[in-house]
Each structure stands twice: as structure tokens, then as C-alpha cells.
Image (cartoon, rainbow, N blue to C red):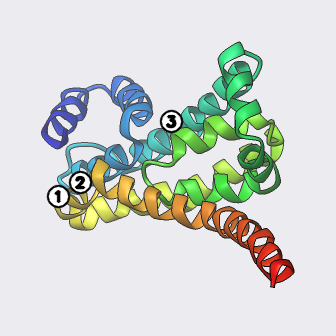
Amino acid sequence: MDAWLTDTITGYAASPVLLFAALFLLTFVQEDAVSVTAGLLSARMVIDPVPAVAAVVLGTVVGDLALYAAGRWLADTRPVRRLRAASGPLEGRLRRQGLLAVAAARFVPGTRLPVFLGSGVVGTPLAASTLVISLTTLAWTPGLFYLGYGAGEHVLAMITPSSGLMVAALLAAVWFAPNIVRRGVSLVRPATAVAAAGA
């Protein structure tokens, strides 16, 4: 994807308006890689860094809010209502800790789509979600841009779908561990009580 992304962005470099639009829209596909690639191309003096940073930040915020909006829209569909009914404890947890999940998702590639959709589905407050998305984007996206500016291709090599999935799997394990342990303990207690009563 790196060569395709670099070629696509470079193809629009002659027109500032088209370049801004391309960077903005490409963040919907792979925001971290677009941020790093824009930094790399700025370092090579192919594109201007100021509008490039503005485009990737704005595209990232709008894309994330679009996922939230899609979640709100999907919340009342029959398949999602069934899924919500089957995942009561998970929904309750996301409802209680939704803003923390939204903030954490910014820094863990591969988690944004499910977290932002899910926060929309459970109705995490829009104003608070917008604030968290905006602040974390301002902390993360320009940082990736400047990493790309300084170390470009080395950083791009580290941003792969598999690295994001591994981190997402680890976070999911940490997220679900308390429920799994609680259920295990609740299953052991009745068995222990029955064994003690029989003795």
C-alpha cells in the first residue's frame, strides 16, 4: 500500500486543492499511513507541510465522527438490536467506559472502526466523543506526520495491519479479562459450597 499511497498523493501535488482533498479522503482508508506518508513527502519537499497536516487532521476527525454517526444510525436496525441484546455486559461496559475506549482507540491502530462504531451504537455522548476524538487526533496525527517527516519509510514499515491486530487482540484480552475471571470465580464458588455441604 505504501507505494500506491505515495504515488496517489504525489499525483495531486501540483494542485493544492486536489492534494488537500486527496489527503482528507485517504485518511478514511488508512489514516496513520496517510499521516506518515504526508510527512515523508513533505520532507522530500513534494508537498507543503502546513496544509498537509491540516488535511490529515481534519480528515481523521471527520472520518471518526462518520463512524460514530454510522453507529448511531445502525443502533436501531434489527441485526444490531439482536447483537446488542446478546452482548449486554459488553454494551454496559462500553456505555460506562466509552470515552476511555474512544481515547485509547486513537493510539491503537485497528481498533478505531469497532470502537467508534460501537460508541455510536451505545450512544456515548456526541459532544464528549467529538472533544475526545479531536484532542486525541491533535495529539496523535501531527506526531505521526512529523515521524514520517523525520523517519518516513522506517515508520511506514512499522504501521501494518498485523501490528494493529496484535495490539487490538492484547487490548481485547485485557478488556475482557475481568469478566472472564468473575465468571470463573462465580462457577467455582457454587461447586465449592456443594462440596463443603456434602462433607
- Up the image or down, 153 lies above or below 6; here it is below
For the point 21% across and 50% down, the residue is 45
Q: Which residue is mark 3?
A: 59
Residue at 53% x, 45% y is 112
Three-letter residue code for mark 1: Glu
Q: Is residue 6 above or below residue 137?
A: above
Q: Quadrant of residue 127?
A: top right
Picture coordinates of residue 180 (x, y %)?
64, 63
Of 81 and 182, nearer the camera is 182
Say which amino acid is labelled 2: Leu
Q: Quadrant of the N terminus?
A: top left
In the rendered structure, are the residues bearing label 3 and label 1 in contact, judged by CB atoms less than 8 Å apart? no
Tell whether 133 sits left or right of 56.
right
Q: Provide the secondary structure element on which disc 3 rests.
A: helix
Secondary structure category for the residue under label 2: helix
Instruction: Single out the mark in the foreground, 1 or 2.
Output: 1
CB under 8 Å between discs 1 and 2: yes
Residue 6 image-quadrant placement? top left
Secondary structure at badge 1 equals helix
1 or 2: tag closer to the N-terminus: 2
Q: Residue at x 72, y 65 (%)?
A: 187
Which residue corresponds to mark 2?
Answer: 40
Residue pointed to by mark 1: 153
